[in-house]
Amino acid sequence: MLPELREKFAQIVGEANALSAPDMIESYLTEPRELFGGLTPLVLRPATREEVAAIMKLANETGTAIVPQGGNTGLVGGQQPDRSGTQVIVSLSRLNKIRNIDISANQITVEAGVILQNVQQAAEEVERLFPLSLGAEGSCQIGGNLSTNAGGTGVIAYGNARELCMGLEVVLPDGRILDDLRTVKKDNTGYNLTNLFIGAEGTLGIITAAVMKLFPRPRGKAVAYVGLKTPAEALKLFTLAQDKAGSMLTGFELIASLAMAATLIHNSQIRSPFDGGASAHEWFVLLDISSTRSDEEARNLMEEILGQAWEEEIIDDAVLAANRGQEKDFWTLREQISPAQKIYGAEIKQDISVPIPSIPDFIREANADVEKMLPGCRIVCFGHMGDGNLHYDIAQAEGDDSQEFLSHWKEVSHHVHALSMRYRGSFSAEHGVGQLKREDLVYFKSPVAVDLMRSFKRLLDPKGIMNPGKML
Ligand SMILES: Cc1cc2nc3c(=O)[nH]c(=O)nc-3n(C[C@H](O)[C@H](O)[C@H](O)COP(=O)(O)OP(=O)(O)OC[C@H]3O[C@@H](n4cnc5c(N)ncnc54)[C@H](O)[C@@H]3O)c2cc1C
């Protein structure tokens, strides 16, 4: 990058927030999967939407590629520059103000760089719930959550980031500011522009603020682990639980024995709810029920569901958490699967969704195919069954050569993705497309859909400066 151009960018944010020294920019180039780390001449840290707008105006005039970055927790490389060393990172971390909380409307207006956990805390302080919750919540930002349309554990009851968002403020690639911070539920005045930027992974503009929905804070909870034989039984349990609990059903996670074993082996301080540990049953379900009234209401409902499931021989065993501490432990056992599964060695990971009634058939078919393709592999399947999302991860056979195993990634992943698409599901349920799934996007989406996406991109970003090389 020419020194004069660097100087102009630095003037917008101040020299202290224009980082080029290797030790200062290292953390912006290190990402969770260690697959996509790129190079950059400059990291800019604007503090206001006006600074973001000025950066984009200059980038547009000079044809400088910009990569928006939130908490840098994305799993598909969308927040990383390429290796050309020409793409400038714009970090949103300093846009970290909560602009407004309105408890009568149940809404919170936040800047894009506010960390998800801080939004949850701000809601809690006014006796409300912000239900978006995921493993990276201590570092990911609301702008990143919206740009990836993040999901997590609460989607079953509250929806994903898109469904939690009322409106956005966005800086367009030419530096104009779109103020679409709508707070009204009813507004039928043309295209929903906000929706275009949610899940766009920073390819159409930079989100600078959002109006998000809040909910009444649950005052009661009941959490249980259930052991059962097959995903087909889990589906029966889900149908029953939904029927009885309706919107009070706030978690329904399916966990294969091998997935639970990973957490238990990796974290010796986490205990199994069952005497036989992870081998007590082939499959487990984590059930979570919330009540806005009391623990008693939640527990009664849970007991009713489990009682009927037992009578109908859907479940083989159930353990109800006795107190808040145990409820937390039950969730930790589920949430620690992702980091723990590395004990199995190299893995080929898929984040797919299929319609909920198809989950048992999908798992059966996928297991049979994958075991044929990779004899001896270990399938670590778990996920948010209540919203159709499965993390269908495949670990190498014990003693296999990791590099040889990983050389099958493309072929095996493509097969699993194709299967999920055959069930009219998705090849990327939560994590997005980024750099990892660009080929899949073109392969699996209809040509009409891809054409429309490219048209929107050209319309908003004719110079192709907004996060190039991602998604499309
Ligand atoms: C341990 C762990 C657990 C996870 N669990 C889940 C989960 O349960 N569910 C789930 O959905 N995801 C999960 N994720 C991945 C998820 O995508 C991210 O955690 C999160 O949503 C991304 O937010 P971020 O601020 O880190 O964004 P980043 O990683 O910085 O960026 C992600 C994408 O959004 C773009 N972007 C970021 N900020 C902006 C902005 N303000 N305007 C425009 N574009 C922007 C980037 O360019 C990039 O394309 C997990 C990740 C980890 C590491």
Image (tube, grey):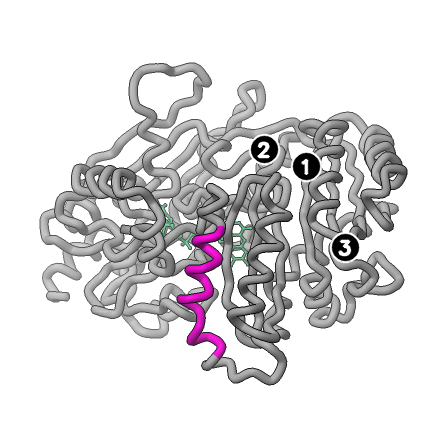
Image quadrant of residue 294? top right
Q: SS of the residue at dot 2?
A: helix
Residues shaded magenta: 405-419
Q: Are marks 3 and 2 in contact (CB under 8 Å)?
A: no
Q: SS of the residue at dot 1?
A: strand
- Give the crowd class for mark 1: few <14, some 14-19, many >=20 residues within 10 Å: many
List x then y, in percent, for residue 184: 44, 18
Tell me the distance, in whole angstroms, between the alpha carbons under discs 3 and 2.
Answer: 23 Å
State the mark number for residue 158: 2
Q: Could one spot residue 142 in this view of the protein?
A: no
Q: SS of the residue at dot 3?
A: helix
- Residue receiving disc 1: 250
Q: Could one spot residue 316 in this view of the protein?
A: yes
In the displayed structure image, the side of residue 361 where residue 205 appears, left or right: left
Q: Residue at x 77, y 53 (%)?
A: 229
List x then y, in percent, for residue 223: 78, 43
Q: Is residue 407 magenta?
A: yes
Q: Amino acid at mark 2?
A: Tyr
In primary-sequence order, the first of circles 3 and 2 is: 2
Q: Amino acid at mark 1?
A: Thr
State the mark number for residue 329: 3
Q: Amino acid at mark 3?
A: Asp
Relative to 104, residue 221 above or below: below
Q: Nearer the viewer, residue 472 or 181?
A: 472
Give the main secondary structure of the magenta stretch: helix
In the displayed structure image, the side of residue 35 where residue 329 appears, left or right: right
